Amino acid sequence: MSGKYKDVAYYPGCALEGTGHAYNRSTKEVGKALGLKITELKNWNCCGAMEVKNVDPKLQTYLSARNLSIAEEMGYKTVMAPCNGCYHNLKKAEYDLAHDQNSREVTDRLSRKAGHKTYEAGKVETIHALDWIKEEIGEEGLKARVKNSLNGLKIANYYGCMYTRPRHIFPEKDQGPGSESTSKPHFMDDLLAAAGAENVDYPLKTACCGGAHTLSDSDTSTKLVLNLLTTAEACGADVIATECPTCHTGLEMHQARAEKVFGRKTKVKILYFTQLLGMALGLSARKVGVQENFSDSMDLLRERGLY
Amino acid sequence: MGGARAMSFDDIAARLDAIVAMPDDALVAAAAQQADELLALGETVLEAWVASRGETPTAQTVEGFRLLALHRQGARGEPSFNACRETCRELVYHHNLVRLDPAHTDTARRLRLGAMVARHLALFIGGKLEVAGLGEFCCASKPLRQNETSAPAETVRQ
């Protein structure tokens, strides 16, 4: 344990209060089981998501900066965001505030207007839930805590497109051994392998899930997801592990839609990596919210002694 | 690496489906050619994207591959296009795996996975072509929403 991330601010973001509730629940439960403390940001706001970012990128920078400012005011040096979209936006705000004078000016103006301290780049570090566990507990620490090995479970780790892109907003990645890779991310693979799972070599781990098209152009999303699912099955995976609520929901909903609209049934199950880690740590499937998933993995989990 | 030029996206999808469905021995019998064809299909997909932006698809290579040069060209001024950067690299990787050792016991599987990767590239870019003019990073729904409130944007036909 490095101690660096033992006590961090927690930014769940909007998705984890809605469709990604199981991710919220399992992240908190895993943290508790690992002895890590998280404190939710007080009065946090939307990170700006894609909607605000596309209309007014500077406003998105401000919205994310406000969350970072709250973390700073609460006395935290680190904020952990499990959602890829939130994680990406906080990192992007950090980058923009460090490199763009106009972003600093707009953020300062809006912060004054809103009556809170203007966030300055470099005060708070944003990490993903993967960084949190990988850095603070590590593979060896995790192995020592496993009570219910994921042994025999074949997993395709799916990171989605926002966890590593664009590269320049993630300066800590691609720093050699031990750091995360933007071209071939592996933190989720490392953690789940430590929990006993067998990771398959999945060639679409950072490919687009069509998440942003989900409501507006469903057929494109369904075809992209169907290809992700069939490729995972071709790789021999029982489960696709996710670390983004948008990807997760997209995979689940379009798995069902692919069967309904295109008559293509796939069997691969979809679970958050925190749910898998939680069960490996001895937490019940219910405790990590498996019953909240749309993808029904109960039979598989029972078969593998995890339920 | 001919054979894939001037194909529509539907033709490309059908060809990739056919490769995925081929029996192992048929795939292995012409492994090198199949690997080259997958790469060529990927190039055709990227050419369509570059051409739709009014540019001439490059003949240059990056790290020895035109596919990667085309991706770089297609991503210029379009950060969201990087969402297929690793898909292109995976396609090259699977091509190399087969080309370096066509007699490997895993060759048929590698070709099928390569075809699935190429299919993802085609689906991703096909989607982007349909919704010309995209969001800042991800393939966001901004233009589609704009279309709901203003005159329809010109749609690029495949």
Image (tube, rainbow, N blue to C red):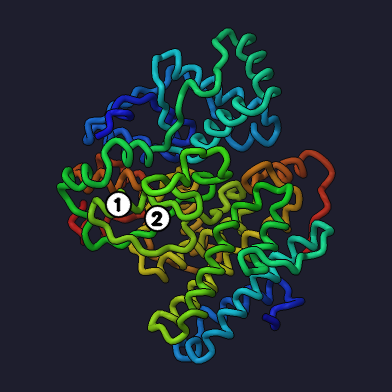
To which chain does the residue with label 2 belong? A
Evaluate whether residue A138 shows in this view: yes
Percent x, y for residue A159?
45, 50
* SS category of the residue bearing label 2: strand
The answer to whether any part of residue A284 appears in the image is no
Query: Quarter of the image containing the C terminus of chain B?
Result: bottom right
Q: Residue at x 69, y 55 (%)?
A: B128
- Is B106 on the left-hand or right-hand side of B149? left
Mark 2 and mark 1 lie on one chain; the one further toward the N terminus is 2
Is the residue B106 above or below the residue A94 in the image?
Answer: below
User: Picture quarter containing residue B8?
Assistant: bottom right
Residue A7, image x, y percentages = 31, 25
Q: Up-down: is A110 above or below A306?
A: above
Where is residue B79 drawn, in percent x and y? 66, 47
At 48% from the left and 41% from the top, the residue drawn is A84
- Return the mark for residue A192: 1
Find the distance from the CA under tag 2 to the CA under tag 1.
9 Å
Q: Position of residue B40 (x, y in %)?
A: 66, 75
| Disc 2 to disc 1: CB gap under 8 Å | yes
Q: Which mark is residue A37?
A: none
Specify the label residue A157 is tagged with: 2
Q: Quick one: label 1, few (<14), some, or many (20+) residues within 10 Å? A: many
What is the secondary structure assignment of the residue under circle 1? helix
Q: Quadrant of the N terminus of chain B?
A: bottom right
